[in-house]
Amino acid sequence: MSIMHRIAAKALIPAFALALASGATQAPAQPQAPAQPQAPAQSGDIVEVRSDKGVVAWLKQEPSIPMIAVSALWVQGGSVSDPAGLAGRANLVSGLLDEGSADLDSQGFQQRLDELAVRLSFEAGRDSFSMSLQTLTDNAPAAFRLAGQAMTSPRFDDEPVERIRRQILTGIARGAQNPNTIAGQLFFEKAYGDDPYGQPVEGTAISVAAITTADLRAFVAERLARDQLIIGVVGDVSPEALKPLLDAAFGDLPATAMPLRLGDVSMASTRGLTVSDYPTPQTAFLFGLPGLKRDDPDYDAARVMNHMLGGGGFTSLLTEEVREKRGLTYGIYSYLRPLGRDGLWLGGLSTSNDKAAEAWQVLRETIRSYAENGPTADRLTKAKANINGAFPLQLTSNKGIAGLLVALQRYDLGKDYVSRRPELIDAVTAADVKRVAQRILDLDGMLAVAVGQPAGLVSDE
């Protein structure tokens, strides 16, 4: 995947990740009847594999197609590890690890990937750094060796470094002209200030320009270590056959990462609406409140709560009140965003400048009423059916299931989570939803940004 495609993708909400971690699944326009998901992985067929060098992975065998998909994630490997003044370092590395290693320059490395029909990509998020590998089973030994070579012997030659740097800088420049991107960056700056969460994952024009090859090598040496690594594998491979493959890809990584002491963090206490003037006919809103981390006991109730409010597509209250009844927007949404060190409830909408004040008022009134009154019994029943019915549809590929195996380990959900998940959702009551709504949806604590020229709206003092 090119770095420009990754930049574009980061502006979107990854459907699978949010389905598992945040619960922001997109429901069908019409509620579905409750379904019993065909679980892609049950506790009996997820196997923990430990290689000779101590690399651990969860494996779901799938012999019907001669392919293997690998998802790997390094905790604390994302932009939280970017040093002061070098925001975007992890992101730049993610675009360069498949641009040459050992005796293969950029062209040679890409040619080798093509010859093997291998898909290899890396990505940096706020909290973590990840790798995705897909290969034919027959080519697995060479593919895993090539992936390992990319991580242990990256070249960082001048030409690809400057080429990928230019691509990132182009993406940053484009983002500076996109109201939604501006809103996202402004929100996190206000929410977290000088904390790493306050910096854009892609970095800034100044910080990206300042990153040196030595900085890139330092990231690889300090962050891509086995003690921070979580791996999921799905495909046509046995546990015994997987062991040498794991060692080929990950066995020569450092045993331990450089200590990164980052405690929990909370949104800044300064809240309210900030209007950022930008010459565009539409105003882009991004709003948020303190949410829940993934291990919070109320998380499943919050998932159901959010689905009814803004995470259920055309079935959600915000869509019904702001779009369907009043025609104030083409799209409005909300979702839970559990970060490694904090939890958020976020939402957004775009509307014409002349309707911005009305849309903002209706949004707040809808949230306030929902928090005070809770859901109707019918809406709750339909929401739970939609959540349970939509989940298995997002696990239709080996790559997606490999990502699930990583998430199950990362959040300590257990190998039987997929089979238990419908019961957890069905157990949520109206009283649970109302309690969690009142816990999260405190409008006095809302932080919001509006980018555009909204008539009748000014920043809160």
Image: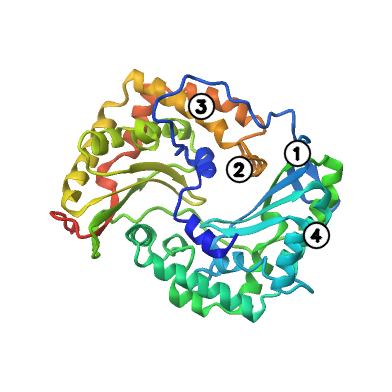
Q: In which quarter of the image is the N terminus?
A: bottom right
Secondary element at image label 3: helix
> Where's residue 106, x and y in %?
69, 72
Q: Earlier in the sequence, mark 2 or mark 3?
A: 3
> How many badges with numbers are in the image?
4
Q: Which of marks 4 and 3 is nearer the N terminus?
A: 4
Toward the viewer: 69 or 408? 69
Q: Name the residue under label 4.
A: 145
What is the quadrant of residue 175 in the picture?
bottom left
Q: Is residue 220 left or right of residue 448?
A: right
Q: Mark 3 points at which residue?
A: 388
Q: Is any atom of residue 85 visible in this view?
A: no
Q: What residue type is labelled 4?
A: Arg
Q: Earlier in the sequence, mark 1 or mark 3?
A: 1
Which residue occupies 25% across, 30% down? 372
Q: Distance between the residues labelled 4 and 3?
A: 39 Å
Q: What residue type is labelled 2?
A: Ala
Q: Distance between the residues labelled 1 and 3?
A: 27 Å
Q: Distance between the residues labelled 1 and 4?
A: 22 Å
Tell me if residue 157 comes above or below residue 14 in the rendering: below
Judge depth for marks 1 and 3 and give the one in front.
Answer: 1
Q: Residue 410 carries which label?
A: none
> Where's residue 441, x and y in %?
31, 39
Secondary element at image label 1: loop
Judge depth for marks 1 and 2 and give the one in front.
Answer: 1
Q: Mark 2 points at which residue?
A: 407
